[in-house]
Amino acid sequence: MNPAVPRSRIAGLVLVVVALSASFGAQNQTVDHDLTAHEWGTFTSIAGNDGRAVQWSPLNGSVDLPTFVEHLNGAQFKAGLRGTVRMETPVLYFYSAQETAVSVKVGFSRGVITEWFPRASHIKPNPNSVLDREALNQKQINGSIAWDSVTVSPNLAASFPRDVSSDDDQANQYYAARETSAAPLRVKTSTGEQQEKFLFYRGVSAFSVPIAATVTPEGKVQVTDLAQEEIPSVIFFERRGDKFGYRLGGALQGEMWLDSPELTGTSDSLSHDLEDILTSQGLYRDEARAMIETWRQSWFEEGSRLFYIVPRHFVNAILPLTITPAPSQTVRVFVGRLELVTPATVQAVQKILAAHDLEGLQTYSRFLEPILDEMKAANPPQAEQIERDLDLTYRSPMVQPQTAK
């Protein structure tokens, strides 16, 4: 190195060269002007007492997927994998007037891909690698998935797989994502060709979400934008029994306060408002409906949560997507779900535990572990009592409905 040249200047020159190389590569990437790609997905997290997403794992595995979907280390592995985000059901659609061959790769910052279909050409880390419960926190893992040979086939009389082993196959939420005008896909795999309406994947990551939410004792929520760009839309949702409500917060930049919603909402009004928000971000109307139908049962379940549109640059940084040749348009719309441990949720869980109501406890089963962790952290003297009540509840038989005499 020439000692007369400052290190800072050399570093600056290197950055310029890298930027110019990236720009040159982007300008020379082949673009298919007849090809369009649209994607939607969900980032699910739970807020701690400080409002930020905490590490958690659900108490059940991927029981909501057909058996033909492939899994990392088996169907139950994901349940024990701790992270801040469960990336749920991104589906990638393609549109073209003529048959087109593409390759697709998605990276995943600080995460692993845990489920996918059709069969992928490459998965990192290796699907057979041994990962433990704390792997995402102990190792610098950046996962990825790739499909090397995808044919967009608009005129294909497709034969999509069904879960013939399941008695309740027709009700599986997976199939709602097929109800769009996207072109069918043919994917060459190591075991032969597979067909599907989209490319599907899921995963778990330890990245920090771009939003925080703290709850006051009165049930109000202070929402903070942690990203470097505006969060396009925020919704505060709450359900208690058969009643629910929601409050539209609009775009977020900086901070906002949201009052607890009145529980006077209707499914039709909420679906309509969500559909409008999703289409305003670039999804087609049938794609927005497919997303809502896919997640209706889970999104609108018992409890309190924030829904927000994840900023696009944030999505691209966490999930870098490469499609070759490049589509003329690529739209990616991800809905963030931040579960909230509100005073109403704490009171409901305390009542369930005191009554040793196993059926009531199962209402919160997916988020039960982090909810109890937050309850114990907020009130340490009650931690042992919570554990005793939890043990007694699990040992109590579920109340069976009486038959009419």
Image: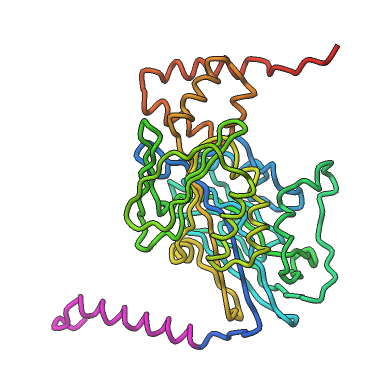
**Position of 308 relative to 386 (above/below):** below
**Position of 154 relative to 305 (above/below):** below
Taking the image as shown, residue 125 lies to the left or right of residue 180, namely left
Which image quarter holds the N terminus?
A: bottom left
Taking the image as shown, residue 281 lies to the left or right of residue 64, namely left
Closer to us: 260 or 165: 260
Classified by dominant secondary structure, the portion drawn in magenta counts as helix
The reply to whether residue 135 is visible in this rendering is no
Quarter of the image for residue 367 reads top right
Looking at this rendering, what residue extends furthest in the front direction? 264
Residue at 54% of width from left, 65% of height from top?
280
**Position of 294 relative to 261 (above/below):** below
Query: What's drawn in magenta, residue-wise?
Result: 1-27
Residue 13 among magenta residues: yes
**Position of 335 relative to 134 (above/below):** below
Residue at 60% of width from left, 38% of height from top?
301
Residue at 47% of width from left, 84% of height from top?
25
Which image quarter holds the C terminus?
A: top right
Tell me residue 97's x, y (percent): 73, 81
Quarter of the image for residue 145 reads bottom right
